[in-house]
Image: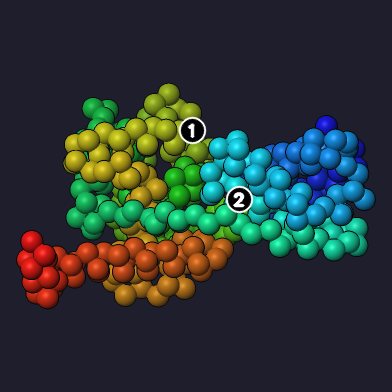
Amino acid sequence: MISPAARDALELWLDHQRALRGAAENTISAYQGDVAEFLAFITRHKGAQQGLGALSVLTTSDMRAWMAHMRGQEVGARSLARKLSAVKSFYRWLSEREGFEPTAVLATRSPKFQRKLPRPLSVDAAKAVIETAELQSLTPWIAARDQAVITLLYGCGLRISEALSLTGADAPLPASLRITGKGGKERVVPVLPAARDAVSAYIRACPHLIAADGPLFKGARGGALSPRAIQGVMAQVRAQLGLPATATPHAMRHSFATHLLNAGGDLRAIQELLGHASLSTTQAYTAVDTARLMEVYARAHPKANRNRATKA
């Protein structure tokens, strides 16, 4: 059991995250679960409910015990790092509010893990995905819809949730769209003529009323289109084209960024187009580009080939 004082503090912190940080509800739910889980462990670890006074004097040993417990629950390094980040954020806020020194918590080292690099498609593969998407349904308007959504993911770098949040008021698509992304962060993205044409073709074919305050993309029965429907289309396209399992709807967004970077796009501009809060997130694409460059070098450079032949 978490003490009433700790529970109240947690709720106040979550309200702070909503109001001042603009955190999305999914993020708030994750924060709530992670910090509540930590506070519950401290209660069990100490053998009694921990009021705010007791929470202010946690030690390095207490933090090590929690980390060990999490690892014993087979929590992976990436997930544990996320949980620790939430706990640190809560303690940073709590220490400022209550006036104590949170060094033991804030000094706890995050577990190291290898960040997964984005797995973009080649330019030809991305084009093939868009062309093949409309072949997955025998119903013309659904075929046009699927192609329109996937074209938006690649042509504008949208997340699937962002594409499916468009409403009838957004149609016909303008030359640029104002998109609200994660954490309520707004950005303006240009809309390529190919994407506008694909959406217009879908709207002309759609048999359902597209109201200004309703979803632009409709499911088969006229309700809001589910992300799972587009994920299913991508799975069929992958099978037909022989693409890897990493060729998901989100991979189209990754491909948008990587292809812009390869064409000489500015990293800061790509950050804005993607709606990344931190440039470090966007910089993952430079690692992808470098990795691909090294693969080409290893295959094509005469010296690399000679070394391979000598070892053989």
> Which quadrant of the structure image shows residue 111?
bottom right
Which residue: 46% across, 61% down?
Answer: 274
Which residue: 78% across, 63% down?
Answer: 103
User: In the depicted view, which residue is nearer to us: 126 or 51?
Assistant: 51
CA–CA distance in space, label 2 to label 1: 32 Å
- Cβ–Cβ below 8 Å for labels 2 and 1? no
Disc 1 marks which residue? 224
User: In the depicted view, which residue is nearer to us: 157 or 289?
Assistant: 289
Which residue: 79% across, 50% down?
Answer: 13
In terms of secondary structure, where does tag 2 sit?
Answer: helix
Which residue: 63% across, 41% down?
Answer: 70
For marks 2 and 1 on the same chain, the one whose residue lies earlier in the sequence: 2
Judge depth for marks 2 and 1 and give the one in front. 2
Disc 2 marks which residue? 82
Q: Is residue 135 left or right of residue 207?
A: left
Numbered circles on residues, count: 2
Using a 10 Å C-alpha cutoff, classify the residue at mark 1 as few (fewer than 14 neighbours), some (14 to 19) or many (20 or more): some
Circle 1: residue type:
Ala
User: In the depicted view, which residue is nearer to us: 213 or 158?
Assistant: 158
Using a 10 Å C-alpha cutoff, classify the residue at mark 2 as few (fewer than 14 neighbours), some (14 to 19) or many (20 or more): some
